[in-house]
Amino acid sequence: MPGNIATPEEWRAARLALLAKEKALVKAHEELVAERQRLPMLPVTKDYAFTGPDGPLSLKDLFGGHSQLVIYHYMFDPAWEDGCDGCAFTLANAPDHRHLAEKDTALVIVSRAPMDKIARWKARNFWAVPWVSSYGGDFNYDYHVTLDEKVVPIEYGYRSKAELDTAGVKNIEGEQPGISVFKLEGDQVYHTYSNFHAIDGIAGINGYLELTPSGRNEGETPCAFKLPWELAEEAAGHSKRDDIFQQEMLLCRSCVPIIGLLGAVSAAVIPNNDGFPKPDTQQSLSLAKEAGGLLPNVPLPTKLGPGSKTTFQLIAFNELFETAFFDSLLQNVTKGVQGYKVEQHGEKITKILTTVRAQEEQHAIAAVAALKTAGEFSPSACEYQFPTSDLPGAIHLAETLTAVVLGALQGANVAFAKEGLTVPIQLISSVIGQEGEQNGFYRHLIKQVPSESPFLTAVPAGFAFSALQAFVVPGSCPYPLSNIDLPILAPLAVNGGPIAAIEPKDQRLSFSADLTGVKNCTAYMGGDTADKLWLTYATGQQKPISVPIDKVKWTDKKIEFEADFPFEKNVMMGFSHAALTTGKDFQTVDDVVCATLAAPAIIQVENTSDCKKLAEL
């Protein structure tokens, strides 16, 4: 019995006896895994349909470019509001799907609940694993994880209803757990394995890989997988250790004295403790007191033109993101997360962040109200990821994002003016002023001149929408992103990352982009690109500035190149952005979008102030 006391000799003898049994178990397990891999494959002949966050998907789509697919059948009946708690435990112990991807294996969760319920449950539990709905299809019934004898004869765990009854398993019906494995060879999908028992005992990367035909797929690097810092880099758009080091140095160069360093990547969903995004009357009043003012009560347009509709959708999409960002930042500060601990003025900083969050919530509520008044689609919250590990980094990011927003809101007023909507112009103008106040404060915190330039840089709506995608967890939005009629462009990295903080002088910058999936990009690949491709900057209210690119290197559809940053001639202080374009001599920034292959690369020219310390907060 446990707790027996033994001599060293007795303990060693007992341990050796147990070791022999452990070795026998390992050998038996290895033989079982090998036999599983030798199972014959069954061709899948039915075209199964699924719904993902961005729309319809086929079974082949779920492979995501990999040759193996593991599906976890998560119990979630369409009539339920929440998913199964037991399945949640299993999913919480599943391996990171990105590690499985390194072994050419996709992990996807499938439930019969509709996608909106799945998205809400997934966001509530902070899960990032891909999850799709099989609602309305045969998939769950054919793979015996939804049991309804009115649809198909009941079978579970490879036993018929009669066999289940004989075994004492009676009245089994409805949603059941399971794991199914598929193999893709060419265009043909094969079913290789399903398991309905002891699923919670399948844990870790190797446990899932051992269910597949290729097993652990170790090759010459049995321990190869991406470390957490590498996964964080990918989420932030980086690929090298020195990129992270460079960003940290840029952030720390102007760190404020009251802020500590180090921490973890932030991630967040929309807060709902104050009733947001649908507060009742009392909650709206409380929110107004935090924000410093009430929501507008002017009559909203009952009809929106196509430009105004898309503009309000972009504003709502952005404001929901900003709400999540500042809520995450506020939570990190108030909970004293490493890197966000504030040694002085904690209450004052908390009050400021609470005010900013409430103001962003009001902006989102107002944009959604405008869309609903006109009977148009309004976006809801996604899951978000923020590549910051400390408060200085978060403030730098807030300043850059606000500069992008201020640039996009200029175009919003143009869209409203073209369609004769005067009320939104006044509302957006008031928001531009308020966002400008915020950004001046952020710039002061990071020791930059609060007002960066006399005329702020314009940002096309398509560039703003594309930039926001870097912070959205892929597949987490509970609607197709195509509902918003804006392009999502290939990202353009500058100096190794999405944002470059540089000195105010003429200099060379390096750029890179992966153009896989970009239409017509092959026409520009290889050879001399001098007369084919340009780098086009937008700064202030100047016409777009196009410069030649050189030192071009193509690797498949990935391009690397360099270009001049013409600071002195164009006085490019503060925020500018750049695009890889197929033309030049543009008249407006909006003209650039249709000729863009990748964008936007964000460039911040530092204009440091000589203040010795922060103003008292």
Image (cartoon, grey):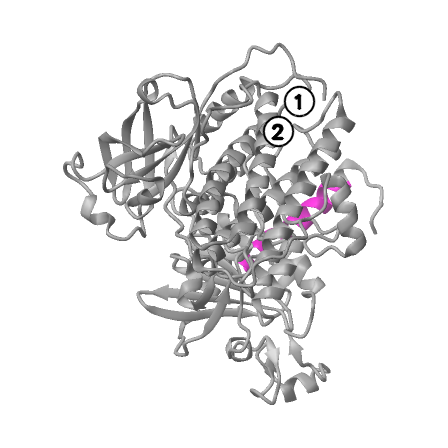
Q: Which residue is mark 1?
A: 260
Q: In this image, 290 relative to 502: left or right?
A: right
Quarter of the figure with residue 196: bottom right
Q: In this image, 219 relative to 271: left or right?
A: left
Q: Is residue 22 magenta?
A: yes
Distance of mark 2 from mark 1, alpha carbons?
7 Å
Seen at 69% across and 34% down, the residue is 353
Instruction: Indicate which disc residue 441 carries.
Output: none
Question: Looking at the picture, which amino acid does disc 1 mark?
Answer: Gly
The residue closer to the viewer here, 171 or 36, is 171
In terms of secondary structure, what is the magenta stretch mainly? helix
Residue 283 place in picture, x, y as percent? 78, 51
Q: Which residue is mark 2?
A: 390
Is 364 above or below relative to 571? below
Quarter of the figure with residue 441: top right
Mark closest to the chain's N terminus, 2 or 1: 1
Magenta stretch bounds: 10-29
Quarter of the figure with residue 561: top left
Helix or strand or loop: what does disc 2 sit on? loop
Give the mark count. 2
